[in-house]
Structure formats: structure tokens, C-alpha cells
Image (cartoon, coloured by chain):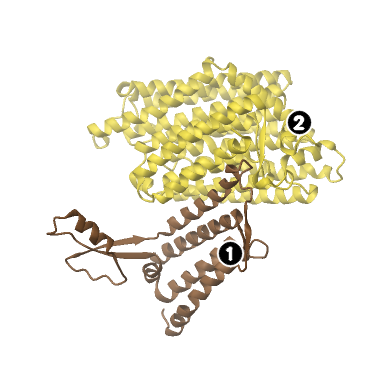
Amino acid sequence: MRTLIFATAIRLLTPLFLLFSVYILFRGHHHPGGGFIGGLICSLAFVFHALAHGSEHTESTYFRLSVCQYKANGKPSQLYYVWSWMQLAIRKNHRNGNHKRFHVIRLRPIYLMAFGLLLAAGSGMVGLILGKPFMTAWWLPLELPVLGSLGTPLLFDTGVFMLVLGMVLKMVFTMKKE
Amino acid sequence: MSAHLLLVLPLLVPLCGAIVCLLFWRLERWQALVSGFTQITWLGSTIFLLKRIITDKAISTQIGSWSAPFGITLVADTFSALVLLAAALVGLAVFLFSVYGLDKSRQRYGYFPLMLFLQVGVGGVCLTGDLFNLYVWFEVILICCFALLSLGGTKPQLEGALKYVTINFIASGLLLTGIGVVYSLFGALNLAELALIVREGTHLNLPLLSMASVFFLTGFGIKAAIFPMFFWLPASYHTSPIAISAFIAGLITKVGIYTLIRLFTLVFITDQTFMMPLMAILSGATMVVGVIGAAAQNDFRRILSFHIISQIGYMLMGLAIYTPLAIAGSIFFIIHNILVKTNLFLVSGVVAQYHRTFQLPRLGGVYLQQPFIALLFFVSALSLAGTPPLSGFWGKFMLAKAGFEAGNYLLVTTSLGVSLVTLFSMTKIWNEVFWKSKPRKPSTSILLTQSDRLRIALLYVPVVFLLCCILAIGVYAGPLIELAMRASQDLLHIETYTDTVLGKAR
């Protein structure tokens, strides 16, 4: 069921959700919040979008990059082919002309999960590299006005954020398909 | 290498492998490549860990530099290093089997990363020094097992996986309750800290310890398939393909028994008069029930599944006798059983690749057609039953000797009788699968192409590899027995463990 009011409201609310989730992520070190809940809120934005517009639309809006590329037919020069590769036009609507080829770059939720895990595991390895136990915190000496201080725990939280986001999106997209 | 790195590597290596496998989603060739590299690295890391343990007895690291009773501790002693090494050997063998022995669709839908996550869980259980952390690692194992058992989604698989996950969730609930009880009684979850509190004997809540221990006995008893709670195991282990069930059957129940031995030598030691007879009864009943259940079965994998239960009884027997020799026997038996049981499952997988069935009445004539696999099965089966020069004998010998020394005659008699029935059961498989002539049915004749034969020939590699390990620890058992003795000494005299975790200052 699609209603106009809901769809319009979601279009306005989605950036708000996303911003709020990042805010929650950053305040999480000393206050309630953090990667897990931030990831849930972030995924909420996409879940609502999928409810309003359908998961197919959500996927194509946020997680798919269609790249259109000119074919090198009739042009013998390899250099020209590379040149046309470099002139990538990023389009949203597919127009299947004869002289064009489309590459669809998809950000699968599973990649989000993998990158999240990688970030979390990698943040722990900083401690190992410094010769201390795994996951020993390491902070940058500077203090930023809004974000607070930066360090490996924040990196870990970001990893959790991405993992949770990927996990929820995977579930939602799979269930929507069935 | 520093202790920090050595202890984290057995967790980090499979974790990183799994992450890279996720990045190669649906590219199963690449996943196999990454997974193989990871398995070899994992094996290497466990060997390094064991080498370090042989010189240093025990090492520990505090994750995130939060000091011991408060943070998460990773600690390895001889026992955990030995189990990890066996797990890594089995992991490599099962991986080698899975590349050509598992269908492409299961490989594509995440077999390799799930397997690696499962290995992270096993590594975590072996290395953690914290009760709650232990529970978390068991959850990791449970979730991965559930996903692996139901991978492919055929009807019997889903049925088996549901049974598995339901009973194991109940076990996890019991464990969580037990952990809550322990924390409310003693205010500590670090195993070393708990061990010291229990041994000091001045804590007011000490009489309630055995009440808490019952939760753990039940919870891990379910996970390890001990007597009254074993029925889920044969119902779920035989449904999934061999590449999955071999690893789970070979390793996961042993992880449960590993934890039981760890906890009941380290923390729950006060009430020997109640707990030890109970354990003896449970272990005897587990042996008998498992082996009787196996006698009634007519499916290759189901017979092997019931034998898992029976052998869990032997491992528990060491804990019930509770002398250094008995626990060393248990440890030896765990290592032996991880290798042998996986190997037998792999053999059944190879046979099924030729004949497309696990049903004993429909199998036959393997000895005539594939004499080499018959030989491989023969040696593994004799090892499982405990024939003298092979590895099963040494474990049973140590357990029986310890039992006689402790005057536990009934239990030893039971175990020896069960051993005989195990031999009978293996003979049954031998007769039905390898010896009798194949029942003639024109509809069931299977033609194998040349590429199929080559593929199956490659499946012999992991079986031969594991058999070499089994023969090595059987014929040249001295070093492993020595290590097992040392591990049991460390389990019974906890000073090394607690000093390593909490620092010498205490």
C-alpha cells in the first residue's frame, strides 16, 4: 500500500534519520548511543523508504550505481576506448541505446557487513601493531568540536554501525522479495 | 611472537578469512582459495601457540588492556592448545573435502564464510578465560551451526536444524541463567578469579555453588549430548551433506565436553561427593545408550552419530574418576575422537560419492570395487573401537587404568563392554557396506564419468591426511600422552592458570 502522505513525509524524514544515526554513533562513546543503535536507526531510514516506495526502488536509489559507457565499435584505437571509459556518465535512468553499455555497481548489504567487520577487526589490530594487547584503544591527540576525540574505539563503533546496517538491510530486502 | 599476537591469531585468522570470503560473495572459486589459505594459516597459528605453550605452560592476554578480573581475558594452556590444534587439523581436512565434495549451490550461498565463522567460535571457546565470554562464543557456534545445518534448505535438513536449534536455545538459556546465578553469588565472572574464590573457601555463598553448577552441567550436557539430553544429536547430524556434518559431528560436541572439563576442574569443585557419582552414572548411561542406539540403526551416518554419543561418555568418564591420569585419558580421548570421528564421516562421504546412498541395505561391495577406501575405513574403525596399536586404545587404556586405580570397577567394566559393542557395530558397517555383495537393482546402477572419478580421487586426500594423523598419535603416542598428562596436571593444579591470568602479584 502506498500513500502520498507517507511517501512525501519519508522523503523529508530520510535525511533526518541518517543525520541522527550518525549523531548517535558519535556521541556513543561517553553517552547512551553507539554503533549498534546508530546502525539500527540508519537502517530504519531505509526500511521506511522501502515501506513507502518498495524495496526495489530503495535498492536502486541508494545501493546501485548505473554507469553508462560508450562502446568502442569501429574505433580501433585502444587509447580512445580508455578515454571513453574515463568519460563515465553517471545516470539514474537506463536508456538502452545501441552505442552504450551499462555497468551496474551494486552495494550489496553483505558487502556492508564485510566492510563493517573488517573495520572493527582492523581497529583492534592497531593495538597489536603498537605491541599492546588486541583492541587496546589508541586516541588521536586532537579534540574536535562536534565529534569529540577520534580514536580506534570510534572506528570499532563505525564497523558495528555498518555491520548492523548491512544485517538489517539484508533481512529486509530478502523478506520483501518473498 | 608476543603472547598478545599468539592468542589473538587463532581468532583473527578465520575472522579475516571469513570477511574476505564475504567480499567475494557468490564467487565460490575465490572463496575456496581464500578459505584454503586461511585454514593453512590457522593450522600454522595453532602450531605456533602449542610450541609456545610447551615452553611457557600458559599464556594470557587482556583484550583492550583492561586488567584481569574486569576485562575479557584470553588464556591458553596445554589443554586448550591441544584441542585447538586438533580443530585446525580437522578444519583443513574438511575444507579439502568440501572443495570437491560439496555441491556448487551450497558453496555459493555462503558455506565457506560460515565455516570460518564457526571456527572463530571454536577458537573463542578454547581461548576465553571469562564465563560470559564463553557463553557468547557458544552462541556464535550455535548460530553458525544452525545456518550450516540448514544450508540448502531441504526438508529433512530444516527439520533436523530446527530440532538442533530449539534444544540448544534451551541449553543457552540455562547457561545464561547459571552465569547470572554465579555472578550474583560471587560477583565475578573471570574463571581464574572464581577459581580462587572457590578455593579460598571463606565466601559466604559457597554452599550455593553446587546449585549454580547444576545449570552448567545441564546446559553443557545438552550441548555435549550427555545421557538424558542426547536425542537431538542423531536427529540433526545426519541430514546435512558430509562436508558440513563431518566438521560439526567431529568437533562441536567435543567443544561442549571441553568446557565441562574446564569448568568442573577449575570452578565447580567443592561438592565432590554429590557431583562425581552423578557424573559416573551419566557417563556410563551415555556410553551404553549411545552404543545401543547405534546397534538399531541402518544408516551409515546415523550409526556414526550414535557413536558420537557413546564416546562422549568416555570423555565424561575421566571427569567422573577425577584423577590426573583419568583426566589425561579424557584429553587424549578428545583429541583422538575429533580426528577419528571426522575421518569416519569423511569416509562415509566418499562411499556415498560412489554409491549415492548412506543406507546400509542398499550399499555393498565397496571392498571389491574400491579396496583403498575400505582399508582407510578399516583402520579408522579399529581406531575408534580401540584396538591396541591405534589411537583409541591409548585413551581407553588410560581411562581404564585410572578407573581401576580409583576403584571405580563398575564404570570401567561398562566402558570395556561398550568398547566391545562398538567393535561389533563397526563390524556391522564393515559387513554391510564393504563386505557383502552389492544388491542388484538395475535402477540404482550409477555410471561415473571420467571427471567424476578424478573428483572423487581428490576426496581421498583429506581422508589419508587425517588417517596419517591418527596413525601418528596411535603408533607414536608418547609425546601426546605426555602433553595430555601435563594438561591434566595444569587443570588440577590451577596455580599456573590463575597466576598467568591475574598476574603473580596476588
Which element type, helix, strand or loop, lies under badge 1? Answer: helix
Which chain is indicated by disc 1?
A: A
Q: Quadrant of the N terminus of chain B?
A: top right
Amino acid type of the residue that numbered disc 2 sits on in the rendered structure? Glu
Query: How dense is the environment of label 1, judged by Cα within 10 Å: few (below 14), some, or many (20 and up)?
Result: many
Q: Which chain is brown?
A: A
Residue placed most toward the observer, B44 or A100: A100
Residue B186 x/y as whole percent: 79, 47
Residue named by callout 2: B495
Amino acid type of the residue that numbered disc 1 sits on in the rendered structure? Leu
* Placement of B267 over or under B410, stated as above or below: below
Residue B108 x/y as whole percent: 36, 48
- Point out which mark residue A113 bears: none
Residue sitting farthest toward the bottom: A5
Which chain is indicated by disc 2?
A: B
Residue placed most toward the observer, B305 or B106: B106
In screen coordinates, is B44 left or right of B350? right
- Point out which mark residue A25 bears: 1
Query: How dense is the environment of label 2, judged by Cα within 10 Å: few (below 14), some, or many (20 and up)?
Result: some
The answer to whether one can see residue B298 in this image is no
Residue B126: which quarter of the image? top right
Residue B315: which quarter of the image? top right
* Placement of B267 over or under A148, stated as above or below: above
Mark toward the viewer: 2 or 1: 1
The answer to whether one can see residue B194 in this image is yes
Q: Residue at x 49, y 19 (%)?
A: B471
Q: Residue at x 62, y 68 (%)?
A: A145
Q: Quadrant of the C terminus of chain B?
A: top right
Residue placed most toward the observer, B347 or A148: A148
Q: Which chain is yellow?
A: B
